[in-house]
Protein backbone atom coordinates (compact mmCIF):
# COMPACT_ATOMS: atom_id res chain seq x y z
CA UNK A 1 0.00 0.00 0.00
CA UNK A 2 2.80 2.40 0.89
CA UNK A 3 4.60 1.89 -2.41
CA UNK A 4 1.39 2.61 -4.28
CA UNK A 5 1.19 5.91 -2.38
CA UNK A 6 4.77 6.65 -3.44
CA UNK A 7 3.98 5.95 -7.09
CA UNK A 8 0.97 8.27 -6.81
CA UNK A 9 3.14 10.99 -5.24
CA UNK A 10 5.68 10.73 -8.05
CA UNK A 11 2.91 10.75 -10.66
CA UNK A 12 1.54 13.86 -8.95
CA UNK A 13 4.95 15.51 -9.30
CA UNK A 14 5.28 14.51 -12.96
CA UNK A 15 1.80 15.72 -13.85
CA UNK A 16 1.93 18.75 -11.58
CA UNK A 17 5.16 20.24 -12.93
CA UNK A 18 3.79 20.03 -16.46
CA UNK A 19 0.35 21.46 -15.68
CA UNK A 20 -0.77 23.37 -12.59
CA UNK A 21 2.61 23.84 -10.91
CA UNK A 22 4.74 24.45 -14.00
CA UNK A 23 7.60 26.92 -14.22
CA UNK A 24 7.38 30.21 -16.12
CA UNK A 25 5.53 30.16 -19.46
CA UNK A 26 7.18 30.90 -22.79
CA UNK A 27 8.20 34.47 -23.55
CA UNK A 28 6.44 36.56 -26.21
CA UNK A 29 8.95 35.44 -28.84
CA UNK A 30 8.18 31.77 -28.12
CA UNK A 31 11.48 31.00 -26.39
CA UNK A 32 11.61 29.49 -22.93
CA UNK A 33 13.64 30.72 -19.98
CA UNK A 34 16.12 28.44 -18.23
CA UNK A 35 13.55 27.51 -15.60
CA UNK A 36 11.76 25.48 -18.29
CA UNK A 37 14.80 23.18 -18.39
CA UNK A 38 14.54 22.73 -14.61
CA UNK A 39 10.89 21.81 -15.08
CA UNK A 40 11.82 19.19 -17.68
CA UNK A 41 14.55 17.76 -15.44
CA UNK A 42 12.18 17.45 -12.48
CA UNK A 43 9.59 15.81 -14.75
CA UNK A 44 12.10 13.22 -15.97
CA UNK A 45 13.32 12.56 -12.42
CA UNK A 46 9.73 12.07 -11.22
CA UNK A 47 9.07 9.54 -13.98
CA UNK A 48 12.30 7.72 -13.07
CA UNK A 49 11.35 7.73 -9.39
CA UNK A 50 7.90 6.30 -10.14
CA UNK A 51 9.55 3.59 -12.26
CA UNK A 52 12.00 2.74 -9.46
CA UNK A 53 9.24 2.37 -6.88
CA UNK A 54 6.98 0.40 -9.24
CA UNK A 55 9.87 -1.91 -10.09
CA UNK A 56 10.72 -2.48 -6.43
CA UNK A 57 7.04 -3.26 -5.86
CA UNK A 58 7.17 -6.02 -8.48
CA UNK A 59 10.57 -7.56 -7.71
CA UNK A 60 11.08 -9.84 -4.72
CA UNK A 61 14.89 -9.88 -4.53
CA UNK A 62 15.80 -8.03 -1.34
CA UNK A 63 19.18 -6.74 -2.58
CA UNK A 64 17.67 -5.37 -5.78
CA UNK A 65 14.88 -3.67 -3.80
CA UNK A 66 17.47 -2.07 -1.51
CA UNK A 67 19.44 -0.83 -4.52
CA UNK A 68 16.27 0.57 -6.12
CA UNK A 69 15.41 2.27 -2.84
CA UNK A 70 18.85 3.85 -2.69
CA UNK A 71 18.47 5.05 -6.28
CA UNK A 72 15.07 6.49 -5.36
CA UNK A 73 16.59 8.49 -2.49
CA UNK A 74 19.45 9.75 -4.69
CA UNK A 75 17.09 10.75 -7.51
CA UNK A 76 14.75 12.49 -5.06
CA UNK A 77 17.65 14.48 -3.62
CA UNK A 78 18.69 15.33 -7.18
CA UNK A 79 15.14 16.50 -7.86
CA UNK A 80 15.37 18.77 -4.83
CA UNK A 81 18.75 20.19 -5.87
CA UNK A 82 18.19 20.68 -9.61
CA UNK A 83 15.84 23.71 -9.61
CA UNK A 84 17.77 26.77 -8.56
CA UNK A 85 21.14 25.09 -8.01
CA UNK A 86 22.04 22.90 -10.96
CA UNK A 87 19.69 24.61 -13.41
CA UNK A 88 19.13 28.26 -12.64
CA UNK A 89 15.67 29.67 -12.23
CA UNK A 90 14.61 33.20 -13.16
CA UNK A 91 16.26 36.13 -11.42
CA UNK A 92 13.23 37.54 -9.60
CA UNK A 93 11.93 35.57 -6.62
CA UNK A 94 8.38 36.70 -7.42
CA UNK A 95 8.29 34.79 -10.71
CA UNK A 96 6.26 31.61 -11.10
CA UNK A 97 9.26 29.29 -11.15
CA UNK A 98 10.25 30.42 -7.63
CA UNK A 99 6.83 30.98 -6.08
CA UNK A 100 4.96 27.95 -7.47
CA UNK A 101 7.18 25.39 -9.20
CA UNK A 102 10.07 25.28 -6.71
CA UNK A 103 7.79 25.31 -3.65
CA UNK A 104 5.66 22.48 -5.06
CA UNK A 105 8.74 20.46 -6.03
CA UNK A 106 10.34 20.77 -2.60
CA UNK A 107 7.11 20.09 -0.69
CA UNK A 108 6.05 16.99 -2.58
CA UNK A 109 9.55 15.50 -2.86
CA UNK A 110 10.10 15.90 0.90
CA UNK A 111 6.70 14.25 1.43
CA UNK A 112 7.86 11.42 -0.85
CA UNK A 113 11.05 10.97 1.17
CA UNK A 114 9.07 10.87 4.43
CA UNK A 115 6.62 8.29 3.05
CA UNK A 116 9.54 6.25 1.68
CA UNK A 117 11.24 6.28 5.09
CA UNK A 118 8.03 5.13 6.80
CA UNK A 119 7.38 2.39 4.22
CA UNK A 120 10.98 1.18 4.43
CA UNK A 121 10.85 1.09 8.23
CA UNK A 122 7.59 -0.87 8.24
CA UNK A 123 8.91 -3.34 5.64
CA UNK A 124 12.10 -3.84 7.67
CA UNK A 125 10.07 -4.37 10.84
CA UNK A 126 7.75 -6.81 9.06
CA UNK A 127 10.67 -8.84 7.65
CA UNK A 128 12.46 -8.87 11.00
CA UNK A 129 9.35 -10.02 12.85
CA UNK A 130 8.51 -12.67 10.26
CA UNK A 131 11.99 -14.15 10.70
CA UNK A 132 11.68 -14.23 14.49
CA UNK A 133 8.17 -15.70 14.32
CA UNK A 134 6.34 -12.85 16.04
CA UNK A 135 3.53 -10.84 14.57
CA UNK A 136 4.11 -7.35 13.22
CA UNK A 137 1.36 -5.41 14.98
CA UNK A 138 0.90 -7.02 18.39
Image (cartoon, rainbow, N blue to C red):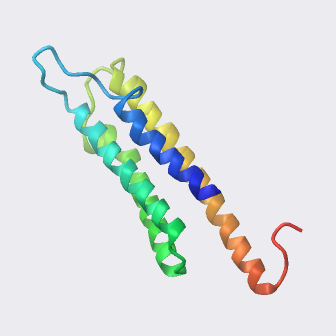
Quadrant (top left, top right, bottom left, bottom right) of the N terminus: bottom right
Residue 42 in picture, x, y percent from top left: 34, 43
Q: How many marks?
A: 0
- Residue at point 76%, 80% (across, down): 130
- Residue at point 25%, 41% (across, down): 87
Residue 118 figure quarter = bottom right
Q: Is residue 54 above or below residue 105?
A: below
Residue farthest to the top, as pictured: 28
Q: Is residue 75 above or below residue 30?
A: below
In screen coordinates, is 116 left or right of 83? right
Residue farthest to the right, as pictured: 138
Quadrant (top left, top right, bottom left, bottom right) of the C terminus: bottom right
Residue farthest to the front, as pictured: 58
Residue 122 figure quarter = bottom right
- Residue at point 14%, 14% (across, down): 28
Q: Is residue 35 above or below residue 29?
A: below
Residue 68 in picture, x, y percent from top left: 45, 68
- Residue at point 35%, 29% (across, down): 22
Residue 137 in picture, x, y percent from top left: 84, 66
In screen coordinates, is 9 left or right of 138? left
Amino acid sequence: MGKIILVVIEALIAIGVKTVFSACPAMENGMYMSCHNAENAVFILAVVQAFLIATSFILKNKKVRIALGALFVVSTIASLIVPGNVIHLCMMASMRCHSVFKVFNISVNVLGLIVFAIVSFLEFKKERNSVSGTRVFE
